[in-house]
Amino acid sequence: MDAQEIIARRVARELRNGDLVNLGIGIPTLVANYVPAGLSVFFQSENGLIGTGPIPEQGLEHPLLTDAGGRPISALPGASTFDSAMSFGLIRGGHVDVTVLGGLQVDAHGLLANWMIPGKMVPGMGGAMDLVSGAKRVIVAMQHAAKGKSKIVAKCTLPLTSARPVQLVVTDMAVIGFPDGKATLLEIAPGISVGEVMAMTDAELVVPDDIREMKI
Amino acid sequence: MRAVSIEEAVAMIPAGASIMVGGFMGVGAPWRLLDELVRQQKAGLSIISNDAALPGKGVGKLFDADLVSRLTATHIGLNPKVQQQMLAKQIAVDLIPQGTFVERIRAGGCGLGGVLTPTGVGTLVAEGKREIEVDGKPFLLETALRAQFALVHAFLADYLGNLSYALTARNFNPVMAMAADTVIVTAEHIVPVGVIAPDHVVTPAPLVDYLITNPNG
């Protein structure tokens, strides 16, 4: 199982029946593939749809039914469509139960940077700032390190996405939460030791006695 | 509402105009109007659009033809050409959060001076903006956004200009149809009055100034 699949499978276990869920691009998109059997959630696409379904069979795509990247998707029975003011009202207004987003850096207090590398990557924040500001629960799904460097940092050096901290970070090595505003190791991936996680984490990490193994 | 040809409609838009363009990654974009803007070489445009689509697609064609001097958008990450033009300072780009973008336009269309949003507080987006506390929580004052023209794409338009939209092609179109001095509409189908039931009209006819004739070109 590759790193992305480990992350996506573990995040999927955070979803609850009936949740309205918004998935970001990249690893978060994969979460939809691992929703536990028997669990029913609504996926929102911020371009104006609740009830997104799988990519349609070739030849059955509709040019006016797409995801936020402009790719063809389908709509499940019970889906609804709406304009962008409603879509972001849902997001900012606390009606979205869970959002799963990618990350560039998360700091020791749970602050997220995921939209810009000054001078290099300036794609625009799209819906990321609204999602982090407004969703009930924000989960970051990202690799623990990039090019050998920890993405869990003492303080973000990249521009922040929001002044509001995220609730949970799921990486290929660990699950980290922020009780009392402090990065806390909650779970470790199968085959990974606490020492390995500590060595690959730049932020100070609270390590409780009862660390569990990630269930994937 | 007046029904006009696409050539006539675009001839009314001066070079340097401010224009809202509906669509999300090209889906629900008024692509025939965009093609005609390129054909008539209307330069120096100030474009307000969620994204820059892709090169060769939707609003992306305006950038391919170097017709844009200013862009207000939320995401340009999938159009490398626009990112290059921005980093080379050929075009001025104002990137704003998507929820803020649509609320500023909604405010512009609804006679509001602006909105208070928690989005962007404590980030680069807050620079130069007033922070206002309401019930102990900080919000940013984001001012209303309007344009001289809105180019809107609907699914159905009736002979009076009532509009309805399809699936994810609705996106910013109905909000922009409220927020410009002149609203120009392309529709996939033009239908008799009554085909769109009152409950299904999303944009009421009085908001539409011009409807482009011959939907199939």
Image (cartoon, helix red, strand yellow):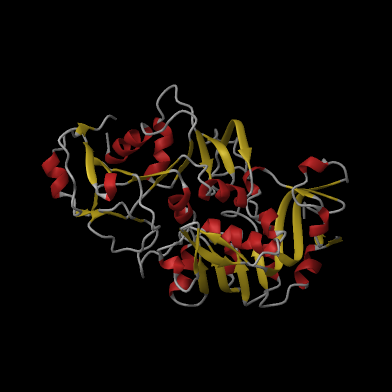
Q: Which quadrant would the N terminus of chain B be assigned to in this image?
A: bottom right
Question: Residue drawn 23% across and 38% down?
Answer: A186
Q: Picture coordinates of residue B97 (x, y %)?
A: 50, 60
Q: Picture coordinates of residue B8 (x, y %)?
A: 81, 68
Q: Residue furthest top?
A: A38
Q: Is residue B216 left or right of residue A188?
A: right
Q: Picture coordinates of residue A136 (x, y %)?
A: 44, 43
User: Who is closer to the viewer here, B66 or B17?
Assistant: B17
Give the tally of numbered discs. 0
Question: Residue drawn 16% across and 42% down?
Answer: A207
Viewer can see residue B53: no
Image quadrant where residue A79 sits: top right
Q: Residue furthest front?
A: B135
Image quadrant where residue B65 sits: bottom right
Viewer can see residue A52: yes
Q: Is residue A9 left or right of residue B81?
A: left
User: Who is closer to the viewer here, B197 or A61?
Assistant: B197
Q: Picture coordinates of residue B122 (x, y %)?
A: 40, 63
Question: Residue drawn 27% across and 37% down?
Answer: A2
Q: Which quadrant would the C terminus of chain B be assigned to in this image?
A: bottom right
Question: Residue drawn 72% across and 76% down?
Answer: B14
